[in-house]
Every structure is written in structure tokens, then in C-alpha cells.
Image (cartoon, rainbow, N blue to C red):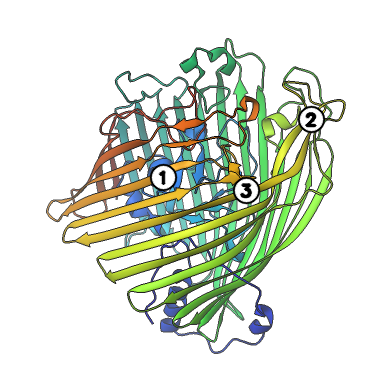
Amino acid sequence: MKLRSHCVSLGLKAVPLALISTFAHAQSAAPTETQLQTIYAIEKAASSTEKVNFKALEESTANEMKEVLSAEPSINFGGGNGTSQWVTIRGMGQDQIDIKVDNTYSDTQMFHHNGRFLLDPALIKDIEVQKGTGSASAGIGATSGAIVARTASAKDLLRPGQTLGFKVNGGFSSNKGRGAGVAAYGQFGALDALVNANWTKEENYKSGGSAKREVQNSALGQRGLLAKFGYALDEQNRIELSHRQEKTHGVRALREEFDFSQDNNEANNAPRYRIYTQDTTRLAYTGRGLGPVDKIETDVYRMSAEMKNFPRAGSGTLLLGASEVETQGANINLDSYLFNEHILKYGVNLRRQEAKPGSRLSTNGTAVDTVNERKTDYGVYAEGIWNLHPVTLTTGLRYDHFKMRTSGRSEVSDGQINPSIAAIYDLNEQVSFNAGLSYATRSPRLYEAMLAGGRRVIADNNLEAERARTLEAGVTYTPSQALRLAATVFHQNTRNHQDYQCINAAGTPCQGRQAASYYRLFNSGTLKNHGYELSAAYAFGHWTTRAGVAYSKPKLDGEVADSTSTAIPIGRTWTTGLAYQLENPNVEVGWRGRFVQSAGYIPSSRGSSATPELVRRSGYGVNDLYANWKPFGTDDLNVNFAVNNLFNKYYKSHSQRSGVSSLPEPGRDVRLNVSYRF
């Protein structure tokens, strides 16, 4: 049997089999090292996508997730810096997807005009993208995909035989940016420790095109901190304590996704000084060989996301103060190897969230009787990966339950069982087929923290969790070690889509800008999405080349969806790359391209600006050049150079609202950075 990593958008899908009864007394003698390698290969074959690893990050000038994941055509980021950016996976917005770092994550947004994802690539060991509905073991709310990252530890940075090491890095960009970082790490007997800090400072950048207009309030200071301590109980068991912080600060528009100066309406988006801080503390234990449990990964964590707004001249008093989203969670993930051929995965996930608004005043300044919103999710699952050569079958079952309290003191709860199934069939050494059907639920999101204190939200008594079903199929063709081709098609259906409705004092829907008595949280309809992805990679001599294309078309109740937080249509996206590796000197030079076709559609909803008019999004093509030089011929010293947006193209991402005030992307940007480990 030839086992290999299948780069398909397919989680570990599952349907109910007699998993628990199969597990009982299914253990045989402890697997040998060869058998363990086979088990690991089977597990890898059933995973979803390839990873961007630490080495690739050190060999690039990327300082934000948009750049790290630019080669993946199904991922799109909006314009601006920091939380100005909206992110989509297959056109699905931030209310439908997650960013998980070391298995910690939250699904509550701070403000509906801001993105809610923030992650410093300098702190990351590796990162991958999971597309579509997740498997039973994918965790809470895995309806439409996730960006999954792991932070680095001292063991990842130390050279063989090294017990103490340091890393320094620094760089600048011609489009008004600079950054620096430092790390210290070591191994002291059974104890290992890492402290890592990274800073970037961006001034207002200039967009492309002949005008080279400065994008107002795009300036941003950012800092990423990571402290991680590990203790090895023995060769197979480890305890780890970590704290991570991402912080941004600067003069930001009230609605960060817009630059109202573009249509001479800046007063309606009054800037203020804003500090956004995200702290995550995590205690984890990993181990192997604990009786019938061959592998265990368990953790507890606390996350705090806080946004502070300070007044400036002309900013007014709207939404000032500090708002916070607090998240506490725990995970127990267990693996047992059955007959040294199969894997049984089972466990429990728990998460509790609370939104703490900075004010109990409405937008017109009147006091509102509200309470902090709270939500608790828990899930239990069992999942099998079965080696039935030439088929790798994944099966499982998951139960999720939520209970929430809204700002208007209504309480609601619901639970759902979700089965799934998938298979990978290795026709021969070169060709494999995959297909799967997955179900998952996502509980109602808490109302945005900055506004929840001034708005009474009341949930329908029969409110249910959103339930996604994804049918996916694909094929991979690998005729040689040098060439790989892959194709995937998918169809997703999400029932019980949730929305809010303004209700007036008469108990009927608000008309125009009529004052709200409360906001109704209800199941509003069905969200559907379908599309395809193609990819190719080829290596010949010192050359490597790749190409990919992704297409998706989300619809809400039969009409094209157009909501940045829920789903938004993205023009067909192509990504390309070509690189040449010199041996002496050790230099890689390359080109990458991202090309998005134009898109036109009549939206199903535009919020307060609802209109039946056709929305047109211009297509664009962006080309980058880059180079990596290793003066010592090793990874100790990396000198990275790039020219992003080589032809100074003026363009706007499709992963954000259309219109004059949406943020354009940066124009030509020449970058240089250096990273040194010793």
C-alpha cells in the first residue's frame, strides 16, 4: 500500500458505526515503530490540506496572514491592516469560519465593521487551511472551514546538540512599514523555554495606480508576544504552559473596513485612538502509551479580546470605552490504535464565552436595561480511520449542545447529532479518488460586544443551531515525484441560518431608521454554496512551478449572498508560482501571481443600503517577485527580498464590501528582511 498526504479539502468525515463496541477490548500488543509509522501515514492520508511550515515563513517577507496564505486560491483577505481585513474561505465569511491557534478559538465578534481574526506569523510553527464542513474530531462549530495554526516551541528552534539559542530579525518596506523581533530559547534538562517578541509599525500606506493615494487611518502598530514553557515527564509525556498576546494600536476609523474620505464623508466615520489586545493562556498535556489510550492531547485555555476606544478631536462619544470578549475552553482528544491497523479518535470539547460591553447606552445616548451575553458549547465525538487497503475509510459521530443568554435576558438551548462519512480510494500508485459527506452545527453567535450593552437582543424560543451539510469529491493524480494534479468539487447546504431583525415598540419590524424596542435573533433561511478547486505542481531540475484555481458561489435563500460576515461572492481566483533554486550561492528566486476575475451579481441583501441594482466587482491581477539568500548555506541566516504588487496595480479585494469607501490594497511595496539564528 502506498500511503501519502492527499491535499484535498476533506476533513476526517464520519457516519455512525459501532465505534464504541469496536473499541472494547480491540487492543492488541503495543505497536512496533514500523506499525506506528504506518498508523501515522494513514492518519495523514485522511487529513485535509498541506501546511505552511516554519521554514517557509523564515524564507519570506510575509508579516501578516494575508501574505502567508496568498498561494491558496480559496482563501481571500480584505484590504487594510490588522482588523480592517475580512477573511473568507470558499466565499464563507468570518461568522461561518474559525481561526484556531493551538486549539484555542472564539466565535464572538467585537464590532460588525471590523474583522475578528488577528495572528502574528512570527509566532507560528505551521499553519494549514481546512475547507468545508469538518469531521467529528474537528471541534466545535466546524461548519465551513478553519485556518489552523500551531505556535513554535524551543524544540522547534534548537539545532541538534544545541541547548541555548537566540534569534533576531528585522526588515522594512517601501510602502511605509518596518519591523523587528527577538527570541531566546533553550533546553535545560527536562525543561524547555521560549520567549519570542515581534513588532511591526505601518504608516498610512499608498494604494496603487497613477494617483498613489494615501489610505487614511490605515497606520497601525502591532506587537506579538509568546512565552512557552514545557516539561518532559518522560520521552512520551509532556506538560506545556504558554501565553500569547497580539496587540494593535493606532488612530483608526470608527468602521475600520471603510475610508470615508474617498467619498468626502469622513465625519460619518470619525477616527479615534484604538487599542485592540488579544491574550491567550493555555495549559496542555500530551502523552502516549497510557493503557488503552495510545495518544492523548488535552488542554485548558482562557482567551481575552479587548478593544479600547479613546476620544480624539471630532470623534464624538459614540462607542468609546473598553469592550471585552472572554473565552474559556477545554479539550480532551484521545486516540487508540486498533489491531495496529486502524485509529479510533474520541473526546470532549468545551467552550464558554461572555461578551462584556463597555457601555449600556444606545447609540442615541439613552440607558438600556441589558445584561452580559453568555454562551456555553460542548461536544462529544467518536471517529474511526480504517485502513481497508486500497481504501482509507473515515467514520464517526458527534453531538454538540449549546446554551446561551442574550442581552435582553432571553435564554435558549439546542443540541444536534452529526454523522459523516468519507473514503479515499487508491486506484494505484498514481491515482486516488476521495468522496465524503459531512454534517456539523454552529451555535448562534453572541451579539457584537461593542453594541450589545445598548441593544436588547431577544432570541426566538425555537432558535436552533445552524446545521451544515457538505458533499465533496475529488481526485489526485501523481504520476511521479515531480508532478501532482488535484481536483475537488463541493456542494454545501446550511439550514437555520441566523440573523437579527429590528423590532419597534409596536412589535412589528422596524421601517427605515425607526427606533428599535429590541432585536430579534431568529433562524432566517438557508445558505448554500457550491464550487470547485483545481491545483497542479511540477518540479524539474532546479525549477518548481505551481498553479491553482478556486470558484465558489454562495447563495442565501436562492439569491446571491452579499454579507462580509456571512458569505460573499468572490470572482474566480487563480494563483500561480515559478521559482528557481541556485545551489552556490544558496539563492531561490521566484515569481507569484494572484488573478481574480470580475464578478457581477444582484445581491440578496445590502443591509441599510438594500438595492436591486447590479453590483460589479472589477477583476485584477497582482504579480510579486521574491528572493531568499542563505549566505551560510544553512537556515541560520536568511536574507529575504520581495517586490509585492510589481506593476503597482490599483485594486480592491472581493473579500470585502463593494463601493467607493471600501479599502484598496497597497501599491508597489519593496521589502527586505533578515532573520538570524545562533
Cα gap from disc 2 to disc 3, whole angstroms? 22 Å
Q: Which of marks 1 and 3 is nearer the N terminus?
A: 3
- The numbered disc on residue 527 is 3
Give the residue type that dot 2 points to: Pro
**Which residue is under mark 2?**
509
Give the crowd class for mark 3: few <14, some 14-19, many >=20 residues within 10 Å: many
User: How far across and how far down the image is residue 418, in percent?
Assistant: 67, 64
Determine which quarter of the picture holds residue 673. Answer: top left
Badge 3 amino acid: Leu
Q: Residue 101, percent across and down?
A: 53, 51
Q: Amino acid under label 1? A: Arg
**Residue at the location (62% across, 34% down)?**
605
Judging depth in this view, the residue of 224 and 529 nearest the camera is 529
Q: What secondary structure is found at the residue carrying circle 3?
A: strand
Q: For mark 1, what is the residue?
A: 572
Depth check: give the residue in front, 371 or 519: 519
Q: In this view, does 44 lie above or below 416?
A: below
Number of disc labels: 3
Question: 415 or 643: nearer the eye?
Answer: 415
Give the mark nearest the N terminus, 2 or 3: 2
Answer whether residue 65 is visible to the viewer in this image: no
Q: Distance between the residues labelled 1 and 3?
A: 20 Å
Q: Position of residue 356 (x, y in %)?
A: 72, 35
- Secondary element type, mark 2: loop
